């Protein structure tokens, strides 16, 4: 690497570009508006300093648009995890400012040029970007409904005893909420109890509408996955939402050169924690508490599901426990096994799509 490297620290209204030379020495830093005009000005600055490699912290959030603009123009854009920029700051005992973060992002890319590309789904596949938009809509509705039902559970316990006894404590919160439609209202209520019922009753229809909209979005996601042609749902334990999550979080699967890199990215690869082994293999390993936690959760749920109803998974887990592993260690080994299967499927799907597009062209 002989040309300067740039780093970008994005925010809602602006983003800061920092450029370092091949030795990591800061050359310049400058802030731009997070608008189309700011993107053009930033690219002019990068071109002036002959920068081709750019690292962006948060390329799937506030840095999404500048990442798309840079990638579309031909810049090699990489995703820089926040932990990498923080490590660069700590190693030099630097302040926490936008300029320092941008320079630290550039140094992180310079130190590890194999970082994966920025998550610009609009450029990688517009269909996957649409799946992500629908998935985030569903996620927002689910989280809002969960929060609402938690408040409902608290308010139901504070209803007058005559009302609460008719609801019973059996069943889910939404079931108890719906029972309010059938209770006998011919009881004497306090002002507080009457007010609680007045705002709980409309939530019954709101909850029905929310559940109906969530199911509609799930059907839409299923149709979009069919259009995409992914085979992730063929893996036992990976349903519609899990498959969509994998597609959106991973993005371009070719950015992972090996199964081990993917496993490390999603936090299912063991981290070596050893000393005294010399040139031999490490003696001890520890659990990786980093990585993409959404993908880690998807793999965990798939492992749980397969252990219940998939004979091959049960045989795998039994074999690991017979080797002396604990049930928890066997589960972790199975998650790593599933990670390998998932990324291989995604590689095959991508190869199939490219071959189909080549045939059509």
Image (cartoon, helix red, strand yellow):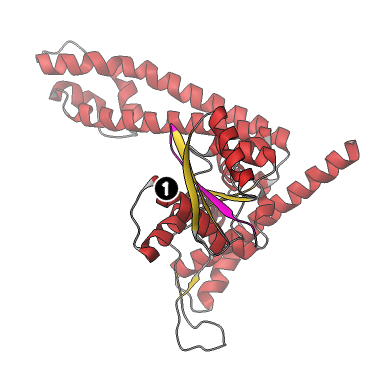
Tally of marks: 1
Is residue 182 visible in the rendered structure shown here?
Answer: no
Asked which quadrant contains residue 173, the reply is top left
- Nearest the camera: 296 or 53? 53
Where residue 233 sits: x, y (%)? 65, 44
Is residue 199 visible in the rendered structure shown here?
Answer: yes
Residue, disc 1: 99
Where residue 69 sits: x, y (%)? 62, 36
Q: In this picture, is 125 found above or below 180?
A: below
Locate residue 159 relative to residue 84 in the image: left or right: left
121 drawn magenta: no
Q: In this picture, is 213 found above or below 249?
A: above
Residue interval drawn in magenta = 3-13
Q: Residue at x 45, y 64 (%)?
A: 288
Label 1 environment density (alpha carbons within 10 Å; few <14, some 14–19, many ≥20): many
7 drawn magenta: yes
Q: Residue at x 58, y 54 (%)?
A: 5
- Nearest the camera: 263 or 181? 263
Judged from the image, the secondary structure of the residue bearing numbered disc 1 is helix
- In which quadrant will I find the C terminus? top right
- In which quadrant will I find the N terminus? bottom right
């Amino acid at each position: 690497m002989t040309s300067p490297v740039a780093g970008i620290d994005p925010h809602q209204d602006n983003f800061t570009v920092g450029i370092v030379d091949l030795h990591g020495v800061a050359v310049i830093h400058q802030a731009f508006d997070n608008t189309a005009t700011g993107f053009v000005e930033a690219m002019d600055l990068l071109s002036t300093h002959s920068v081709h490699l750019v690292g962006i912290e948060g390329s799937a959030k506030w840095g999404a648009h500048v990442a798309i603009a840079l990638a579309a123009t031909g810049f090699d854009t990489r995703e820089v995890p926040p932990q990498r920029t923080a490590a660069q700051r700590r190693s030099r005992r630097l302040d926490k400012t936008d300029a320092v973060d941008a320079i630290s992002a550039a140094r992180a890319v310079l130190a590890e040029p194999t970082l994966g590309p920025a998550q610009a789904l609009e450029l990688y596949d517009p269909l996957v970007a649409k799946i992500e938009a629908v998935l985030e809509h569903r996620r927002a509705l689910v989280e809002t409904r969960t929060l609402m039902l938690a408040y409902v559970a608290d308010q139901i316990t504070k209803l007058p005893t005559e009302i609460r006894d008719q609801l019973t404590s059996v069943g889910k919160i939404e079931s108890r909420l719906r029972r309010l439609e059938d209770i006998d209202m011919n009881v004497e209520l306090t002002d507080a109890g009457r007010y609680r019922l007045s705002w709980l009753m409309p939530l019954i229809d709101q909850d029905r509408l929310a559940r109906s909209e969530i199911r509609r979005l799930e059907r839409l996601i299923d149709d979009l996955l069919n259009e995409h042609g992914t085979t992730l749902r063929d893996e036992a334990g990976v349903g519609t939402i899990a498959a969509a999550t994998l597609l959106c979080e991973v993005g371009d699967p070719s950015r992972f050169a090996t199964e081990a890199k993917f496993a490390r990215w999603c936090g299912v690869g063991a981290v070596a924690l050893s000393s005294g082994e010399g040139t031999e293999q490490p003696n001890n390993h520890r659990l990786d508490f980093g990585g993409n936690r959404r993908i880690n959760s998807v793999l965990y749920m798939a492992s749980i599901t397969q252990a219940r109803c998939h004979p091959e998974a049960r045989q795998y887990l039994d074999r690991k426990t017979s080797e002396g592993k604990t049930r928890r260690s066997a589960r972790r080994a199975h998650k790593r096994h599933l990670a390998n299967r998932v990324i291989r499927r995604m590689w095959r799907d991508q190869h199939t799509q490219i071959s189909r597009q080549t045939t059509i062209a």
